[in-house]
Amino acid sequence: MVRLLTRALALLALHWLTLAAAAEATAPCSLATRSERIGQGTIVYNSVGSGPQVLLIHGLFANKEQWNALACLLAESGFTAIAVDLPGYGKSEGFALPDYSLESQVAKLRALTTRLDIQRIDLAGNSMGGAIVALYASRYPRQVRSVAFIGAPLGVIGWNQGIRDAIRKGINPFVPVTEPQLDVEVHLLPRAGHLLHMENAAEVAPLYADFLKRTGAGRESPGPKSVAATFDCQDGKTVKAVFENGAQSLVKLALSDGRELTLPQARSGSGARYADADESFVFWNKGDTAFIEERGRVTYRGCNARR
């Protein structure tokens, strides 16, 4: 896999001269442009093809149009290519400054794939987009079939440890939103190394399509396995939970106040954590214990699994 990606990167290994021309280039096929309301903003994306879904994430100072040629060629190879304008880029609008952090970009993309009912997906990121897909894959490994870094940090390009650590902490070294983050950027970027850009899409597409097929894109995953549990909480409250572990791990909740929710699993350093798109509702579970947090306030506490 590394050899295949290295070949693809070799075809792309030119200095980043400009992305404006690429953004304005006419697509060689008919792309459908759609939008979805995510949180307070709107994400706009291009889609083309039929088959296993591939999410293409652009880099800094770029937009979804940088993928036009590659998206069309992937469609010809039997895939559905989805290229998004990240929040704050292209035609995606209505987002607040904190939404530009890498963690928030990942959360918004997760919300988009949930809205589009995408159960399994292949990810490809260019430049800053590579950092975003790396974080996405680490947060939601059960949903991701494969990751391709195309001229991206955290791939085969040797970015320094400082930038890697900042990315893993969710700090966007390219778009700082606080003064401390600006200090981090000023310190890191002079040592960042070279950025790469999309060139020779006609040569890259068959390599990437072959890579996707080799890594099992489109193969049927085993059906979900379900485990049910009832938790008795303080103040006479109860939570009925059905945990499903399949292509996408999730929990279905029935609360004693009458609400029913389905939450995908999110990343947690301890125990299992399930949250909605904006993380305003979080269900925590560790062993036989659980609690629910809503907008930072614990509403179901001291929950223990019924024997």
Image: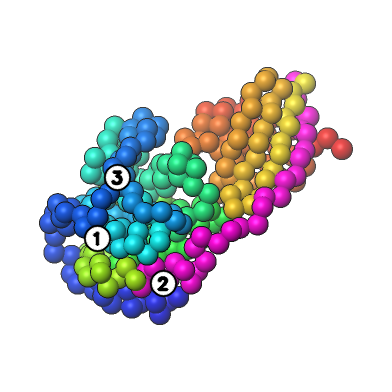
Disc 3 is placed on an element classified as: strand
Q: Nearer the viewer, residue 247 or 100?
A: 247
Question: Which label was assigned to residue 69?
Answer: 1
The span from disc 2 to disc 3 (Cα, nearest Å) is 24 Å
> For the C terminus, which image quadrant?
top right
Under circle 1, the secondary element is: helix
- Does the magenta portion include 8? no
State yes or no: discs 2 and 3 in contact (Cβ < 8 Å).
Answer: no
Query: The residue under label 1 is which amino acid type?
Result: Ala
Q: Could one spot residue 60 in this view of the protein?
A: no
Residue underneath mark 2: 210
Write down the residue under mark 3: 32
Residue drawn at point x = 71 percent, y = 39 percent: 242
The percent coordinates of residue 44 (x first, y second) are 30, 40
- The image quarter containing residue 289 is top right
Whole-percent x, y for residue 14 in the image? 19, 72
In the rendered image, the residue lying farthest to the right is 307
Amino acid under label 2?
Asp
Disc 2 crowd, CA 10 A, few/some/many (<14, 14-19, 20+): some
Q: Residues within 10 Å of mark 3 (few under 14, many from 20)?
A: few
Question: Spatial distance from mark 1 to mark 3, Cα to Cα?
Answer: 14 Å
Comes first in the chain, label 2 or label 3: 3
